[in-house]
Image (cartoon, coloured by chain):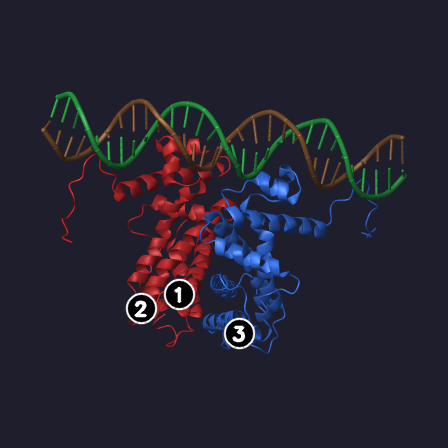
Chain colours: A blue, B red, C brown, D green
Amino acid sequence: MVDSGPVPRRGRPPVSDEQRRRQRLDISRHAVRLFAEQGVAATSGEQIARAAGVSERTLWRYFPGKESCVEPLLTRMIDAFRAVLHAWPAELSLAEHLRAAYQPVLDSSSAEDIDAVLAVVRMTHDEPALRAAYLMLRERAEETFVEVLAERLGSSPDALDVRVQAAAISAVLKVAADDFARETAGRGITPDVLTGHREELAHALALVTSGLPDGGTSA
Amino acid sequence: MVDSGPVPRRGRPPVSDEQRRRQRLDISRHAVRLFAEQGVAATSGEQIARAAGVSERTLWRYFPGKESCVEPLLTRMIDAFRAVLHAWPAELSLAEHLRAAYQPVLDSSSAEDIDAVLAVVRMTHDEPALRAAYLMLRERAEETFVEVLAERLGSSPDALDVRVQAAAISAVLKVAADDFARETAGRGITPDVLTGHREELAHALALVTSGLPDGGTSA
DNA sequence: ACTTTAATGACAGCCACTGCCAACAAACTG
DNA sequence: CAGTTTGTTGGCAGTGGCTGTCATTAAAGT
């Protein structure tokens, strides 16, 4: 079988993944703003679509439901953790690594996005539909943790210990994120709440990942 | 202020909580059966209502949405764990206690209910709406774990360590439940998969709860 | 220009869910 | 017993989320 390379396609090319990502993110920003202003129930799909400058039909093509419009923004928060998890060096425990390298504020995110994300997390406590979307997203992210842990521990992603550890880490991250969102409610993100958050996360992770053979150095 | 006792009420008394519980459970059974037979999307609210012998209007009074009809049945599974958690003696570690006392099959549940519950758990892997409801239910149950742990550790339900431990336990329980549902897929519930499940749960819990001061005896 | 492939928008329709009100049920009161 | 009160249920109409379908437009190649 010779690889004849990318066959010269005909007709209009599909939108690039990058473009699609940007489009979804843009819609997400408008949706979250509307949700924060008037609540989820009071915000209609037509409203979101108009704000984003697309037809309602295309909105439903980009998102399977109203609540999942928050997903692209929320993903940014989880990506911040995923990035630091990928950069986890072998000689450090996870808690140590986090204390040294965890920056919950993504450099690629604008300040407004961060505030919006935290606002969403706060909203999930009163809006069941948003909470459900939030939990679903977290569970999808858990798969990533499984992969990273499996590679590091040299075992299969199907191994029980790996999945349990990933689930525990995910759970800890949820608690810490909720706390972080709650504490930044009035005052915004100050440097001390930020370091406090990092410290809380590291402490909690150490609490849960100490059951490994080497007591946390490799997990 | 003298307590004049229960004032002699007038008019029709509200339905007892017990009656309401039974009604919801009955509807839940019919809904789950229909979901399993023809899928969630293909099952209409009117269908569920007819099967349960109530009007559609009353169905929506008993449940906020189609997917939450599975809740009363699913709760039974979580209640099984909650019960054993309440009976946790002070001198044992949680893993030890589980190995000795955990019966995932509730005595009060009929065999068909158990199968139905496991069927729902299996369905949640393909039906996002059901997965969302499942996760929401689990998170509500987490609050119970927090209360039990707080009382046992003699600290506040707001304490970080308590909430983290509860979240970790909840996460472990989720993994174990998914495995259990998967393993009972074809063959049904055999004694060996049951003991295997109990062993898996105990092992995984030990893995996650060893970070406590006494290494798991009190958590 | 013409063809091809993909994205979008417009329209119609289904169904989950809600508000509203009449009908009915179960208590107490005279 | 009729009459009153309080609560549940069912029917009906309406809203809005979401989908299937199709014509239209955009972006490529020949």
Q: Please identify the quadrant where the N terminus of chain B is shown.
A: bottom left
SS class, disc 1: helix
Q: Bin the neighbour count of mark 2 within 10 Å (Cα to Cα): few under 14, some 14-19, many 20 and up.
A: some
Q: Residues within 10 Å of mark 1 (few under 14, many from 20)?
A: many
Q: Looking at numbered disc 2 in the image, what kind of residue is underneath it?
A: Arg
Q: Which quadrant, please, contains the C terminus of chain B?
A: bottom left
**Residue B132 horizontal/vertical position (percent):** 48, 49
Q: Which residue is mark 2?
A: B152
Local SS, label 3: helix
Q: What residue type is disc 3 on?
A: Ala
Q: Are marks 3 and 1 on the same chain?
A: no
Residue receiving disc 3: A95
Chain of residue at mark 2: B
Up-down relation of residue B83 to residue B68 (above or below): below
**Between marks 3 and 2, how big is the CA–CA gap?**
27 Å
Answer whether labels 2 and 1 touch (C-beta < 8 Å): no
Q: CA distance from mark 3 to mark 1?
A: 25 Å
The picture places residue A202, in percent across and down from the top left corner, at: 51, 72
* Of residues C14 and B160, the one drawn nearer to the viewer in this rendering: B160
Give the numbered dot on residue B202: 1
Task: Name the residue at 51% across, 75% down.
Answer: A216
Q: Are marks 3 and 2 on the same chain?
A: no
For residue A113, side relative to residue B180 (left or right): right
- Provide the chain ID for the residue under circle 3: A
